[in-house]
Image: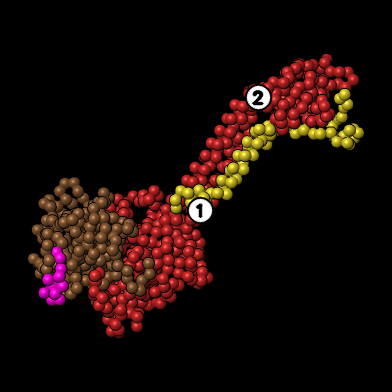
Chain colours: A brown, B yellow, C red
Amino acid sequence: MNIYTCPQCGKSVQRKLKDSVLVLCPKCSAKVFGTIDISPESHGVPDDLSTVQVGSTGKYKEKKFEVIGRIRIQMIDDFRNLWCAVYDNDKTLWICQSHESIAFADDNFKSFPPKSDIVMRAGGKVIFGDSVKLKVVFVGSMLYMHFEGEIAHFPHPQGDFAFVHAVNERGNTAIIVTKGNDMDKTELLWGVTKQIDQPIFENTRTIDGWQR
Amino acid sequence: MNQWEDYKGLRWYLVVVFMLLSFYAYSQTVGWLWWGSTSTTVPTEQSQGGRHGYRYFNHK
Amino acid sequence: MAGSDKQISYFCPRCKSANVPRGRALTVSMTCKSCGVYFVVHSNINDTFKSKYEPVIPVGTKGIFDGKTYEVMGFSVKREKKYRYLFREYFLFSPYHGIAFLAEFDGHWNFLKPYANHPWSLAYTDEDPYVNGSMFQLYARYRAEVMYATGEYFNDMIGVTEESEHWEHIAPPHILTYEQSKTMASSFIGKYTTQDEIAKAFKLDKSKLPNKIGMGYTEPIGGSFTGRALVVTTALSILLAFILMMFFANTADDKNLLHMSYTQADLKDSTKMIQTESFELVGTKNLVLQIYAPVENNWFFAEYSMINDVTNEEFIFTKEVEYYYGYEGGENWSEGSKTSEVFLSRVPPGKYHFNIYPEFGTFSGKVDVAVFHDTVFYTNFWLTAVALLLFPLGVFVFRHYKDVKRWQDSDYSPYSSDDE
């Protein structure tokens, strides 16, 4: 059991993923475990009225998952919540949430494949090798990012990156994090898109002052 | 709009269709041609006097 | 924990008042509650408006759509750049159900929700999108500018609106929108919403809503059914009528009750008439009398009296046979026929005979008479089919007329060649 004690508040915190790179205290957002450093302002996530929370559960491909952490990326015009979940007992599941869609990726961020390319504008192409093509639906420069809970590997945790969201008609989603359009500093999360109005999560929170 | 709702919107037309088909079936059963049948006249009291209409003959 | 409970507030770049956004960290742009200036919270972008517009649904009002409660977060007035017409948008939000929009133009409303599966978002195509079993047709393509805004938004509403190109496709009562800028492509799917539904959703007095002008571009036409349902119903009804017709055609007795011939010489001297043999009619059915007279450029006329042997009840009718032909202007012509037919409807059962009172004129041939009972006839089927088609045809003509009106303000009207 990977149990850590928060150096700030003394809370006992369990690490649930074997390959996580950061664990923040759920009580005070202090770092209790980590192989990466993040800026002090990135500890803890501002309230964005999300009903999903650390501890929310659900099923993906008939297997259970539990949300254990989140990276909230604020861009000038939009945001993305990258929920990190433990899936099928010990695997990583990333859930990318926006106002318009939700995407699931039962994998980790990986290096951008060779012979691939991105046209960095909405409507631009993302090409992997000779055959796979996706259409860019969002490009944004990261403005702020915030972390909570336990996080698996994420490229550029210190920020200063561009976020690209691309999709295709087969329901595939590519979440791409890139720096200076340098393919060596570009990583990819490959998943599938789901409609946001499908019931997905359980153990969500009720928000004061808002009716259902 | 689901399919049932779609047909629910046609309920008055369906009622008219049912009535029309029932009337059609009745008419065929009794040999009632709605348009184009020969008009007939039944002799009246006046016509029996030979003043108006068709001639009247004693058939017996 | 889903975020810090620490209250977020943003200072107006103009009057420096503190503004606490209702949407918390989701809020990207808002108008100052003190001075009304629009500003983007993560940048120094700000804007003021020349005119002020009052929303009919105030910011903060809660409304229920499909059992889901949304709150009005923002209200904006936008102007289409080419034709310069104004339309109004209400930005709605619920933490449980996400974002939505209510768009109003000329008193017609559409309720819209995000739709990630727009075919244009997923692939490189400019074909009319086929979504949820409906083909959506392009109605408008435009750029817009923001004339006024109040409340808060989850993006830089003015920047996104003015930097994007907008496409609107319709499959009434549904609408599919797509907008694309350099940084984002987004899509919404929506449905025409009546004034009654708006008033009920927000508990508003309907009379306060803007008056409807003309035909709404997603407004449903004439009845809560689709053309497809009407076509299917009509086709099945005509098929049923056809099956009935086939049944009656196959079960008709078509019995030859009488066949006789006579000439002028056969007339009884005293009455100048022919009396036929009696025949029995079983059941109320039709009776057909076929007359053949070999007239050549001549006519033959007779009065017929069908008499019930028991009750003396009498049906009287006349029938003429005439046939003329000739050669004129290098062409043969003919008129009339040597045969004639009488159709008697609903003849009551009983024992009958005919008294025939012929007028031979100059004709002197042999006249054939045949009587048939319970014959096959198709006219009623065709009349039924026509009657069944009247309502659908009326609906399609009416819908076509209304549809032409719907498209009259569009640059992409499928009827544009008709109008020219």
Q: Magenta residues?
A: A5-15
Query: Residue at 16% across / 56% down in the picture?
Result: A90
Residue named by callout 1: C224
Percent coordinates x, y for residue A122 in the rendering:
24, 59
Percent coordinates x, y for residue C322 in the rendering:
73, 24
Q: CA distance from mark 2 to mark 1?
A: 45 Å
Secondary element at tag 2: loop
Callout 1, which amino acid? Ser
Question: Viewed as shown, does residue C295 lie left or right of A201?
Answer: right
Question: Viewed as shown, does residue B13 lie left or right of A127?
Answer: right
Q: On residue C253, which mark appears?
A: 2
Q: Is residue C162 visible?
A: no
Viewer-proximal residue among B14 and C320? B14
In this rendering, is residue A97 above or below C271?
A: below
Callout 2, which amino acid? Asp
Q: Residues within 10 Å of mark 2 (few under 14, many from 20)?
A: some
Question: Viewed as shown, does residue C211 lie left or right of A90?
Answer: right
Tags 2 and 1 both on a single chain: yes
Examine the image and state in which quarter residue C57 appears. Answer: bottom left
Q: Residues within 10 Å of mark 1 (few under 14, many from 20)?
A: some
Percent coordinates x, y for residue C181 in the rendering:
27, 62
Query: Residue at 73% across / 18% down in the picture?
Result: C259
